[in-house]
Amino acid sequence: MNVLFSGNEAVARGAYEAGCRFGAAYPGTPSSEIMENFVRYPGVHAQWSPNEKVAFEVCIGASMSGARAMAAMKHVGVNVAADPLMTFAYTGLKGGFVLISADDPEMHSSQNEQDNRRWGPFAKIPILEPSDSAEAREFVMRAFQLSEEYDTPVMLRLTTRISHSKGLVEVGEPKEPVPAKYVKDIDKYVMMPAFARKRHIIVEERMEKLRRLAEEIDINREEMNDSKIGIVTGGISYQYVKEILPDASVFKIGMTYPLPLERIRAFAGKVDRLLVVEELEPFYEEQLKIHGIPCEGKEYTTLLGEITPERLRNSLAKAGVIENGKGAPKPENVVPRPPVLCPGCAHRGVFYALKKLKADVFGDIGCYTLAALEPLEALHSCICMGASIGNAIGAALVKGTAKPVAIIGDSTFLHSGITGLLDSVYNQAKVTVVILDNHATAMTGGQQHPATGYSLNGEPAPDVNIPELVKALGVKNVHLIDPYNLDQTKKALKTSFKEEGPSVVITTRPCMLFPKKIKGHAYYITEDCNGCGACLRIGCPAIAGAGVFTEKGLQKVIIDETTCTGCELCVQVCPIDVIFPLAEKEKAVKS
Ligand SMILES: Cc1ncc(C[n+]2csc(CCOP(=O)(O)OP(=O)(O)O)c2C)c(N)n1
């Protein structure tokens, strides 16, 4: 049966068909839908973990017990899971273990565009890389098989285009899982130096076997055609190459690491010119060159962002392979739509207050990162998940600022903010930590986390009490605030600036979109608006210029009633009190 699947759906299906019934993940674009789909299959235990390291470790435990396990994360998640990954590559496993790394070239929704193929040689693990949804299903099944055959975790590397584009996938019968049974194996799993040294030898021997496998495996394939040009490519770039150069000879790489160097050498011997087409890093190219296979690559293709068909056309033109711009579609005239905090977003008021109070705000990753943009411009750094608290502590301890504030979402706090807060207590840093608790991992689609009260499959789950957790870490000053109440918010922040040691301010309003969309009663602005623009400075997308001007030439403002949620933030900032509930106006008209 053929089914239209996104790459992520196909991975979930492939894992299920491979007899895997265990998965753990922390959400992150473009990977999140893998676990969300996997959990829907019968008999599957799939879970959100507080972060990628825990997800990875949970899967190690399942694999040590003989079960096939899949850990899924976005590319930067692998950095968080890197500690167990680097040593798990030494121990090897029992049940097949597949690590899905969904990379994000072009940074559609990420803070960097690191190329996770580099983890192959670094961790000494094999990597498979599909070029469409059908391969995503097939390769995850192959990955489980390889994992058990070679006693190694296997990475399946996806990119945004593979994860999110749809294609036809032929599905098969699911395999029954092998019953789990934990068997002690101290030499294999206790990585103290004496045992780890022995395992390192095994790792190097395994790499040798994997290199031999790469030369044989059918997911690396030569597609001989016109011999004037030969292209080495894989992943989504393969599709672009086939579209633009249907007559070229292609060496398609399905096993990204280790590379089939001898087969590529033989392929190079059959073509006049060898070109490598790959997104981001010159990963294939460097290896070919190190092994004495002359090729061209990054002198024509970009290190930055995706290789779109259009960019590839330009690269091929630069390389003299096609005529300039041949066949390139006209770029569409798309009006840019920068992302903004939603109307009624509970984060807005806090940032408005922080700006007014002239605080130095160390930020984190979540919807709230958007507060760095105009008109709020109230978040001043964003490095990685959980970094805000440590950053604020450092700034406070060197006395670089009088008002160091760390601002972090609830999901991010539970992911990697707890230890930072512990540091602020331990080292008595005079910082204000604002936890924006909207009861959701909103940025990535409103996923559950350990404080929402629900698990990935929607079942009720114990919910950690964030204020109590904060107090248990030793924080003495804890303020709960309603972020829709600007006076209360400002007061709590001002108090926190005066308190000794760390202070924590926790917001209590839910996200406007998750678990379901909140639509309160809308407000309107009367004709008495004087166009001062105060309400525009909160950056609410429901508020816009009316196209009507005052005598002073200032533009009056209107509220879009369909998107206004009635949070009343604009009411609180309007200096001349001309914003009222729409219901009052309607009542007046009727009577
Ligand atoms: C290591 C890592 N994992 C996952 C992500 C993807 N991601 C970005 S922000 C975020 C969490 C957002 O939730 P929260 O902190 O509660 O803030 P909200 O968006 O709800 O305001 C996630 C999972 C990431 N950027 N880095």
Image (cartoon, rainbow, N blue to C red):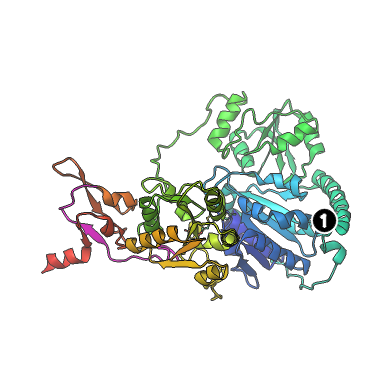
The image quadrant of residue 73 is: bottom right
Residue for badge 1: 150
**Residue 94 in magenta stretch:** no
| Residue 5 location (% of width, % of height) | 58, 57
| Residue 352 location (% of width, % of height) | 36, 53
| Residue 252 location (% of width, % of height) | 70, 41
Give the residue drawn at x 79%, y 73%: 181
Q: How many marks?
A: 1
Q: Would residue 558 be seen by someone viewing this image from the given angle?
A: yes
Q: Would residue 515 be seen by someone viewing this image from the given angle?
A: no
Q: In the image, is 455 to the left or to the right of 212?
A: left
| Residue 86 location (% of width, % of height) | 75, 53
In the picture, the quarter occupied by the C terminus is: bottom left
Which range of residues does the magenta coloring cover? 510-532
Crowd rating for badge 1 (residues with CA inside 10 Å; few <14, some 14–19, many 20+): some
Predominant SS along the magenta part: loop
**Residue 519 in magenta stretch:** yes
Given residues 290 and 146, the one toward you in this image is: 290
